[in-house]
Structures are given as C-alpha cells and as structure tokens.
C-alpha cells in the first residue's frame, strides 16, 4: 500500500463505482471511502463506496496495513463477477492489486457515529451522520420526492417561479415571523424585513401573467415548539391555480396533486424506496388517495367527542363547535380515522385573513388542511378571498395595515383570476411516506429551536 501522495496521473482510467459492471475482466481504478474493513490473515475485504453505491474489494492483507474506516482511497484492481451464492449491491467485485490512501481518517471514526446511533448523535454529528448508508438513501429519496412534485406540476402546466425569501409583510401571523434588518436606500435608514413564512402572495401575483404556477422554496417560522413535526426552516412546495369557481374544483386539484405526485414518486424512486423497504408502503399510500375522506370542521368536532378525544383530557371537557382542534387531538382523530382526510370549512376566526368565505355560512372559510395518519397536517390550502372590500375589512380585523398589502389588494381590483392554492410541507410529507417518527429523521440539515449546526 502506498501512503504517500499518489502520482496524480495514471494511465488507468478511474471508473465510477456504479459503472464497474461494464468493465468486467479489465483492470481499473476506483475512488471511494472505506465503509467497512475486515482483515484476515492472508486476505482482507474492503467495502469501498462513494455515495450510495459500493463495491467489495478483495486484496492481500499486506496491502492494507494502516488503513482505517472512512479513509478515502484509490484502488487499482481487476473487475470480476461476484462468486456464485454471494450477495452484494453490485454483481461485481474488485480483485485489488494496490491501494493508495488519498486521505487517511483517524481510527476512531467507527465509534463517532455508528450505524443505529441515537437521535442525539444523529443531530450533534450530522456532518458524519450524512454518511450513514440509510440516511444517505433518505437524502436521495428526498431529492426524488422533490423531482416528483416538480414532475406533477410540469405535467399539469404549472410554471415554476422563484419567489423572494425577504418580504416586507407577514402572511401567516405575526407570532412566527423572523424579523431582520435589510439595507435601506441609505446606510442610516435600514428597513425591517422578514423571512418569508409562505410564498403564497408572490404566486398569487404571478398568476395573471403566467397562469397556474408553483415554487419549491424554504419557508421560515419562528416556532418555539419542540415538536416532532415543526422546524424553523422547512421546504415548502406551493402552488396557485386560477379559475377555481367552486370549492370542489379546489379539492379536485388537491386530489390530483396527491395522486400525481405519488405516481411520479413511485416511478422515480422505485429503487431507493425498495432498498429502504418502503416501496410497498408508498404504493399503499398511493392507493389511499382513491379514498380520501372530506370532513367539515364542525363534523370533526362531533367525531372527536364520539371517539373520546377531548379539549381537556384531564377534565374530559369536550370541544365546542367553533374550537380550533390542537395538534395532538387532531392527530389522534386522524389516526383513529386511518385515512387521508381533507379537513375543510373552518371557523374564520382562527384562519388567515386571505381565505375565501363559505357562501353557505359566511362565518366559515373555504380552507382545506390535508391530514394524514401518523403525522397530521401536511398541506394547508384554500380558496382565496376575491372581493376587494371584504379583503380590506379582513385585513383590518386581523390588525394589519391595508396599505402594507396594497399590491395584494390590487390583484382584487384589476381582475382577479379566482385562484385557490396550497402549501405542502415537503419534510412532513416525507416523514409520512417513510413512516418516520420525527421530521428531523428526513431533513438533511434540520433547523429548530436550539439547532443551527452544522
Ligand atoms: O398551513 P400553512 O401555514 O399554509 C400556508 O403557509 C399557506 N400560505 C400555503 C399556501 O396556501 N400557499 O403551511 C403549509 C404547510 C403545512 O401544512 C405544513 O406541512 C408545512 O407547511 N409547515 C411546516 N412544516 C414544518 N415546520 C413548520 N414549522 C411548518 N409550518 C408549516
């Protein structure tokens, strides 16, 4: 084994591990990390990997002296089919001749972040945990879910736009706003800006010019809750659809979105979902989209009482008809129903000012939260208030200044496209799809109170 800096040039081609199958019988070079190392008397076995693909290298033990797990190496050797009866990720292995250590790792690596480590280690050593083979697949699946969401929107003629992350106004209530200083026209006059809570207003403004549109971008909420489904920064896939004249049109868009996204996802992520043992689960969830329950808020209150879910568990106080159902009870209800639920028509007092009123009961709004067993809400959505005067009034009722929202109000003044829209929490959706306990198990770099590293 050579431990000095290797000569950069070599007449042998470096082959990506995933393509080794095309080089059976040839001597090649590969680059990768030592994932596992088993040293025998005569021969040693190295699992060498780069990203999610790995190959076994069989080499005489005198070539691996000093080698440690996690080191980055260059292996020279012959590509051979794996012996009959042996299982491996690839149908080939490498009969190694030579190993160059390009970057030697200290030998304590395997104890720093061992496979199956607890939640604290997985967070505190995130930069190492990203190398965990299972977490690496989750990271890959996350990227494939985003591809699937985009594929659905592209297929349904929605155009992707890039909304700003700095905004001048709130969208989802002042309690979760991140404020910061933005440079003003002069150094002495900085402006107050916020990190966006939702790109909804930007999408609404884009619709008249560009038609149906969407974005996949981070949203920020200064949530002080340490729950297993809240982050301070999350990935938000949002869309806005024009020509929504009935509430049912909006619900149809949501049904299409769930079905379409999951169809694309099953196709794009088939291999990685299978590796993770989740393909059958996601197929079953896809089938669930044919049997979505639509539940009005007031019916949900009745269901809670029927199912022994109380506003106050200790005193067994039932919910009143216009109560907001808190997260824990809402999840208990959806778990007990065991289906995807469209929770609709909420009392207007606890929903945002922009939601359209229900023509059958003007004290309720045409909102729809998509709820799923195990996680709860993954999508917040609704028909937008289209009437200028009413929107103006609702802004005042919410304690906001209509002049701060003049561009938003203009949309209602100069020919409104009768839109509805939605925001899908990508991290929550993935938590549901992979049946994970916490949102932190599927986010590459989770941000929540007390966590800003790495
Ligand atoms: O229900 P929300 O607040 O809806 C909106 O932001 C709308 N303006 C979206 C729209 O109509 N364009 O948030 C939408 C979704 C939630 O259902 C949830 O999945 C996710 O965003 N979400 C969070 N995910 C992780 N951590 C948080 N703190 C989240 N807050 C919302």
Image: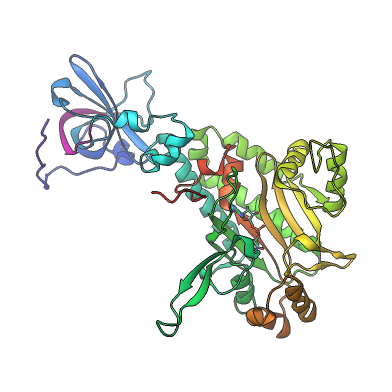
- Which residue range is magenta in the image? 94-106
Q: Where residue 257 appears, x then y in whole percent? A: 66, 55
Task: Judge from the rendering whether residue 255 lies leftward or rightward of residue 104; answer left or right.
Answer: right
Q: Is residue 66 visible?
A: yes
The relative height of residue 452 versus residue 399 in the rendered view (above or below) is above
Quarter of the image where one finds residue 51: top left
Q: Residue at x 78, y 68 (%)?
A: 356
The outermost residue toward the top is 41
Foreground of the two, 156 or 100:
100
Percent coordinates x, y for residue 309 in the rendering: 81, 38
Residue 239: percent from left, percent from top: 63, 64
Foreground residue among 328 and 264: 328
Location of the N terminus by quadrant is top left
The number of numbered discs placed on residues in the rendered structure image is 0
Compared to residue 185, the image places residue 214 above or below, namely: above
Q: Main secondary structure of the magenta part?
A: strand
Q: Position of residue 444 (x, y in %)?
A: 45, 47
- Viewer-proximal residue among 215 and 265: 215
Type of colouring: rainbow
């Amino acid at each position: 084994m050579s431990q000095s800096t290797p000569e950069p040039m070599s007449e042998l081609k470096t082959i990506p591990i995933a393509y080794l199958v095309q080089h059976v019988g040839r001597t090649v070079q590969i680059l990768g990390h030592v994932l596992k190392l088993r040293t025998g008397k005569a021969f040693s076995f190295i699992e060498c990997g780069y990203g999610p693909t790995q190959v076994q290298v069989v080499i005489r033990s005198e070539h691996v002296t000093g080698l440690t797990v996690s080191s980055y190496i260059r292996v020279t050797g012959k590509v051979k089919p794996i012996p009959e009866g042996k299982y491996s990720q690839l149908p080939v292995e490498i009969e190694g001749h030579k190993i160059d250590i390009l970057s030697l790792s200290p030998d304590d690596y395997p104890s720093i972040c061992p496979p199956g480590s607890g939640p604290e280690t997985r967070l505190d050593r995130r930069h190492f945990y990203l190398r965990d083979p299972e977490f690496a697949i989750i990271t890959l699946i996350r990227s494939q879910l985003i591809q699937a969401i985009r594929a659905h929107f592209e297929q349904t003629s929605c155009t992707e736009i890039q909304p700003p992350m700095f905004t001048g106004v709130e969208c989802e209530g002042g309690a979760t706003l991140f404020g910061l200083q933005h440079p003003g026209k002069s150094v002495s006059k900085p402006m107050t800006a916020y990190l966006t809570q939702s790109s909804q207003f930007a999408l609404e403004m884009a619709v008249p010019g560009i038609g149906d549109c969407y974005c996949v971008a981070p949203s920020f909420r200064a949530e002080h809750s340490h729950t297993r489904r809240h982050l301070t920064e999350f990935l938000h896939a949002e869309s806005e659809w024009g020509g929504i004249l009935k509430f049912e049109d909006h619900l149809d868009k949501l049904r299409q979105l769930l079905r379409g996204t999951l169809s694309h996802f099953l196709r794009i992520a088939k291999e990685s979902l299978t590796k993770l043992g989740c393909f059958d689960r996601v197929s079953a969830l896809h089938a669930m989209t044919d049997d979505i329950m639509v539940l009005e808020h007031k019916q949900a209150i009745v269901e809670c009482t029927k199912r022994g879910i109380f506003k106050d568990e200790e005193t067994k106080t039932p919910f009143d008809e216009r109560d907001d159902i808190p997260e824990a009870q809402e999840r208990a209800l959806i778990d007990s129903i065991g289906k995807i639920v469209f929770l609709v028509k909420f009392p207007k007092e606890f929903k945002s000012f922009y939601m359209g009123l229900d023509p059958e009961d003007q004290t309720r709004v045409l909102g729809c939260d998509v709820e799923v067993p195990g996680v709860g809400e993954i999508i917040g959505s609704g028909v937008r208030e289209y009437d200028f005067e009413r929107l103006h009034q609702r802004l005042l009722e919410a304690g906001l200044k209509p002049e701060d929202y003049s561009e938003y109000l203009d949309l209602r003044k100069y020919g409104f496209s009768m839109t509805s829209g939605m925001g899908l929490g990508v991290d929550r959706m993935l938590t549901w799809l992979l049946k994970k306990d916490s949102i932190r198990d599927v986010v590459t770099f989770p941000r929540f109170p007390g966590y800003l590293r790495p």
